[in-house]
Image: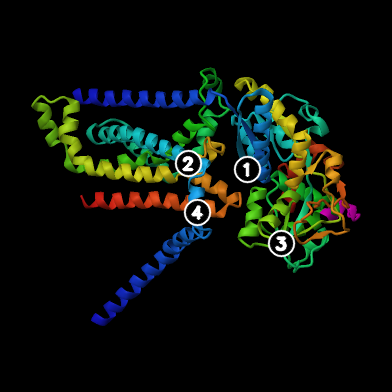
Amino acid sequence: MKKLYGVLKAVTCFVFIMCVAVVSSGCSVNKKDYIINVSYDPTRELYENYNSLFEKHWKEKTGESIEIIQSHGGSGKQALEVANGLEADVVTLALEQDIQAIADAGMIDDGFTDEFPDESAPYTSTIVFLVRSGNPKNISDWGDILKDDVGVITPNPKTSGGARWNYLAAWYYFESQGQSEDEIIESMRKLYENVLVLDSGARASTTSFVENGQGDVLIAWENEAFLSMLEYPGEYEVVVPSTSILCQPTVAVVDEMVKKHGTENVAEEYLDYLYSDEAQKLEAENYYRPVNKDIAEKYVIQEDERVIKEVPEDGRWMVNDIELTDIEHFGGWKETTRKHFGDNGFFDRIYE
Amino acid sequence: MRKENKLVKWIMISICALFLFVMLVLPLGYIIYTSLSDGVKSFISSVTDEYTIKAMKLTIITTLWAVGINTVFGLCASWCLTRFDFKGKKVISALIDLPLTISPVIAGLVFLLTYGRQSVLYPLLEKFGISIIFAVPGVIIATIFVTFPYISREIIPVLNSIGTDEEEAAALMGMNGFEIFRKITFPHIRWAFLFGVVLCSARAMGEFGAVSVLSGHLKGLTNTLPLHVEMLYQGYDFTGAFAVSSLLILMAVVILILRNILEKK
């Protein structure tokens, strides 16, 4: 009996410690002098810079200090984590559909694309190729990456937002060549047969291509491609294809969480300030296309060049001579997701 | 015959040595080499970076919680399982081992489903302002889960082998439960217990899978050292990633030395 008493004492002790643990750490989370920005993979550098800009701006505007805590990962995975309770105040994801998933979970009010200018996409990007120096496989457009001896790196469209843009950009090229749906699927199948590594996120793909030396061409976000060139001068070239897609990474305030945290104002301002001149310049310097036309103009490349061998010293990197399609062409994200990326969608038929 | 034996011996030894070299010494050495390739200065600046220090703090806090709670749990469990007979004892014994065989990712997902926003428990937690998932408690719970067999697994065999004679004698002489534990049982299991603690802390510090699912990768908030390494690596900061890795290796080596000391006891 006494032995049992000892055991009971220990168990009580254990339960008590557990309670203290949970409550103490739970409480510390509720004190809010920070907001959480859940973003997608390639924006690490952008938001590192933007956060210090914003922290300064907020201090000047309100006199309060604020800290921004970042989380990065594949866009779809990040959206899922927010829907599962990751306490993001703002989300800055790769595509509208991922934010829609959070809205579907009831955490973001409808109409989030109208909340900020330009469909709530303060910067845009497009899809380009990154090839190894000297372009040994002679890749200049989408058709070239279907050749048998070309190794392609692109992430998995099931998990990565960037990969969906890649997929759609490729689709559009074949469509603009006048191919029928069956022919496009055949071309896409050829493309995905050439894929050597199907990573879960854009950044993991870049690492596969750059650090692990896999493949001949990386289909990548424009900003990601330029960043790789910057990190490894002289080792890579950016090839801008003749057609691509206008990628609109959407931003939104997570209404449920800001209400809970009392961070409505700062979250709103955080996203709004992305449209300010300073921030738009910063975005352009990080190789995103700013929506402010006047500012974007200053970054457009001068020569008629589609292959960029090194990061231009004058900061003019933007190739404007591309035929860009957009998601509307595919009937919006909802339709596209169902048709292409859902179970038994086109992608499942293409990549078996 | 004698010669042949010698030959076999040397072949075995060289296979062993080669294997260890290729699988362990080479990669670890390479990591330390890379982390120092940009000079000691950049090594020190990556190791003393604000976020590295925050990650280290979290790792240490998590390890302390995991070891603390698993100590209590491990002692209770091993005591129950060796000193009492009850229905379902075998089941409990098997359940304790589950974290060893289950993939940590699954462990993470299980907690995500149980305490996440989509769970039925969530409104209740919400009401009390408790956040578990994607917060520090989630990281701690995940770590506790993957480490809980370590301490009890070390103690149970020892308790089984010493039997209950001494304890029964002490009980007859009028000692209470706690005294018996302190004066009779604990001295027997002391070294096994410490050995378990060491293994448990090693595992807790290095845990990646389950924590990765539950942490939400919040930089400076829920990033433990292993997650921080991944983040640095994906942020092109290879020197930083390897510097922090060598920090983890250093902690592991210290634990290894402790383990060897304990093993001799």
Q: Residue at x 83, y 43 (%)?
A: A296
* Residue farthest to the left, as pictured: B173
Q: Nearer the viewer, mark 1 or mark 3?
A: 3
The residues bearing labels 4 and 2 have C-alpha atoms spaced at a distance of: 17 Å
Residue A73 — which label?
Answer: 1
Disc 4 designates what residue? B41
How many residues crowd around disc 4 within 10 Å: few (fewer than 14), some, or many (20 or more)? few
Magenta span = A174-184
The residue depicted at 65 percent of the width and 47 percent of the height is A201
- Label 4 is found on which chain of the structure? B
Residue at numbered disc 2: B53
Please state which amino acid type lies under the numbered disc 1. Gly
Q: Amino acid at mark 3?
A: Tyr
* Element under disc 2: helix
Category of crowding for the residue at label 1, using alpha-carbon neighbours closer than 10 angstroms: few (below 14), some (14–19), many (at least 20): many
Q: Earlier in the sequence, mark 1 or mark 3?
A: 1
Percent coordinates x, y for residue B14 in the rendering: 36, 72
User: In the displayed image of the protein, which residue is found farthest to the top?
Assistant: B127
Q: Which residue is mark 3?
A: A236
